Amino acid sequence: MNIFKFPMGEIHFKYDNTCPKIVVIDEIENVNDALITAALLVGYLGNEHPTKQVFLPYFPYARQDRQTSLQEPSSFFWLAERLFYDTDAQLYCFDLHNPVAAPFSCEIENITIDRAFQRFPGEYPLDMLIVPDHGAIGRCNLVRKHFKAMAIASKTRNVETGALTFGGISYPDDLPTGKHCWIVDDICDGGGTFIPIIKQLYEDGAKTVSLYVSHGGFTKGLQPLIDAGITSIVTTSSLKSAVNLAGDLVKIIPCKNLLEAHDE
């Protein structure tokens, strides 16, 4: 399948018999282009074609899943219901920001975070799971079995300004002294959620602090995380911004491997 843009920016594609069983849209550079591409494919492929599955690991606008005021839209609901409603083709996503918020009227199936941990690089010790905030407890419970202990951080966000206030870390299982700690979340945008957690873990005696995120935006680069003391980062190939940073610090799980884990 050849997916391309016209000179004025419109997305188009040409289907042929070499199209794979499932079309994967990863290494996304432009989230709006990716969303339109997925919508066009799902609408087209439901029309008597053998390929009826599209995998869009990162669903743009998934974080805008509720209204915090009457002056703004609930973008995720609006887009999902209008672009992916009543289709014959199936859209898969990976680790949606709030999977319970996905409209039931849409053909969207969420592949959960535990699939990534089935393909997790084996060289990393997993001593303590760090939940970055209370909203991530459900997600982290899916991978809790891979760790020896768990701790929970807290934060508050000013809905008007977006400013974050770190509320500390509780250790119900054990202290992080001498342990290899992993913060686990769905998205890293600028890293503001994680930096105070990293610093606090080291103050509390952690040996190393690493980060797993399903979707690595890294909009402020890696330096803020490096300055805070991050040891390792693992993410997926969903976003090009993460793939471009692959190296000694950043390891990438290919999204096609998530599909293999999903089928097991």
Image: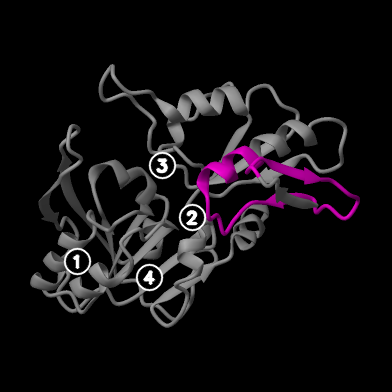
Tell me the mark number nearer the camera, choosing from 3 and 2.
Answer: 3
Give the mark nearest the N terminus, 4 or 1. Answer: 1
Give the distance between the C-alpha atoms of the residues marked 3 and 1, in whole angstroms: 22 Å
Task: Determine the secondary structure under disc 2.
Answer: helix
Give the mark nearest the N terminus, 3 or 1. Answer: 3
Tell me the mark number nearer the camera, choosing from 1 and 2.
Answer: 1
* Amino acid on which disc 3 is placed: His
Asked where in the image residue 225 lies, by quadrant, the reply is bottom left
Residue 114 got which mark? 2
Give the distance between the C-alpha atoms of the residues marked 4 and 1, in whole angstroms: 13 Å
User: Is the residue 142 above or below the residue 48 in the image?
Assistant: below
Give the mark nearest the N terminus, 2 or 4. Answer: 2
Residue 97 got which mark? 3
Q: Residues within 10 Å of mark 3 (few under 14, many from 20)?
A: many
Give the distance between the C-alpha atoms of the residues marked 3 and 2, in whole angstroms: 14 Å
**Cβ atoms at labels 3 and 4 below 8 Å apart:** no
- Residue 76, horizontal then vertical, whole percent: 46, 30
Q: Is residue 11 magenta?
A: yes
Q: Residues within 10 Å of mark 4 (few under 14, many from 20)?
A: many
- Residue occupying the far right of the picture: 17
* Amino acid on which disc 4 is placed: Ile
Reading the image, the residue beneath label 1 is 198
Give the mark nearest the N terminus, 3 or 2. Answer: 3
* Amino acid on which disc 1 is placed: Ile
- Magenta part of the protein: which range? 8-37
